[in-house]
Image (cartoon, rainbow, N blue to C red):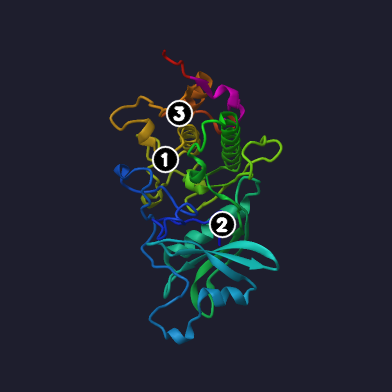
Amino acid sequence: LSIEMFDFCRVLARLEDTDISDAESSISGKSGKSGASSLLSRRSPRRSGLSITSGRNTEDLKTYKDLLLQRGYHITGVLGRGQNSGFVVHSATKDGETFAVKVSTECDEEGTNGATLRREHQILSRLSHENIVKVSAMWNGEVGDGVPGAAMVLEYCKGSTLSRHLPFSSHREVVSHLAWRRSCLQQLAIAVAYLRSMSLEHRDLHARNVMVEFPSRLEVSPSECPVVVKVVDFGCSAPTDCDKVMEEDVNVNILPVGSTKPCDVFALGLLGVALLAGKEICSWGVVPPEGSELRLPPCGLKEFRLAKPFEDYLRTLLDLDSERRLKAQDAVDKLPEDTRWLIPKKVSL
């Protein structure tokens, strides 16, 4: 299965295959020094895979492929799996339609992974938005034949993660680059505002949890063939009024410096910085641990620099004072036009 045609997947640990790591992963980790690419596990160290094995007679066990086939889902590939996490995401077809099936394998006892999957299903079942991955079904309790675990059927999102699209491929297509990047940031801001209207926080919003389907020709305008953005991986989501934050669920890479509570608006600001820098950005990359002064990285297009309207916008998203930080709907309403993002640098003769 082409990596360009994979769906929503979420792997909460370093993926075993580097080509798959963009399909489903997290920039999470407890060590801020590990950098933006650190993919440290946040879940219990359960092993996962296509085959289920335990202390019971293995002849009585079936693979998940067999179990899913009984429900009409024909497995076509593995989209992602966690090295230390009990989740596996398959691509599957049923009645001519492609889905993603996220399963939890926990052998003799269900443990925390099944509970996490159920919580994610409950959250996604409340949501209905074009920029958020849709859930189709959930199998509670046993996946089949007495095998404990859980499975969730999800929308199959075409494209790849935003992290794959961050680098600037050509300096000759500045206008097209800015149009697409603004479209991505706008849709993300709309998704964050929608979640806030539903009294929810994603809490793990970063480039590897955003699926993007770009048109085949970058030079066409967004209005003719718009980019499609989907926010995925709601395993860490919680109500906005929830002050309880589990340490293992905290993604320090996008956590506001000096805070212990994630903020989607702050994470949106980091994505805005990443779209202009052309690479993934961590919170300590813009706010050094030794101080509180915001430090925006240079633009990925070396001939340009940030225009003041967009710089001011990013600064209000990334304000460490939660009271001064932009509200979710304001982040949508005050997003500058792409013509106000960059200005050419003066050339010294």
Provide the residue designation for mark 3.
299
Question: Residue 147: x percent and y percent?
Answer: 49, 77
> Which element is circle 1 on?
loop
Tell me: 307 left or right of 290. right
Location of residue 198 by image quarter: top right
Q: State which quarter of the image contains the C terminus.
A: top left
Q: Residue at x 39, y 47 (%)?
A: 250
Q: CA distance from mark 2 to mark 1?
A: 25 Å
| Residue 332 among magenta residues | yes
Instruction: Check the image and name the residue furthest to the top.
Output: 349
Q: Is residue 36 above or below residue 98?
A: above
Q: Are marks 2 and 3 in contact (CB under 8 Å)?
A: no
The magenta stretch is 331-344
Query: Where in the figure is residue 177, as x and y percent of width and height?
Result: 56, 33
Which residue corresponds to mark 2? 6
Disc 1: CA contacts within 10 A as few (<14), some (14-19) or many (>=20): many
Whichever of callouts 2 and 1 sits on the residue coming sooner in the sequence is 2
Q: Disc 1 marks which residue?
A: 254
Please say if 185 is above or below 211.
above
Q: Is residue 244 visible?
A: yes
**SS state under label 2:** loop
Q: Residue at the spot x=46%, y=63% of the render?
A: 87
Q: Amino acid at mark 3?
A: Cys
Asked whether residue 205 appears in the rendered view, the answer is no
Q: Amino acid at mark 1?
A: Ile
- Label 2, residues with CA under 10 Å away: few <14, some 14-19, many ≥20: many
Residue toward you, 39 or 170: 170
Q: Single out the mark in the foreground, 2 or 1.
A: 2
The quarter of the picture where residue 8 lies is bottom right
Left or right position of 191 against 203: right
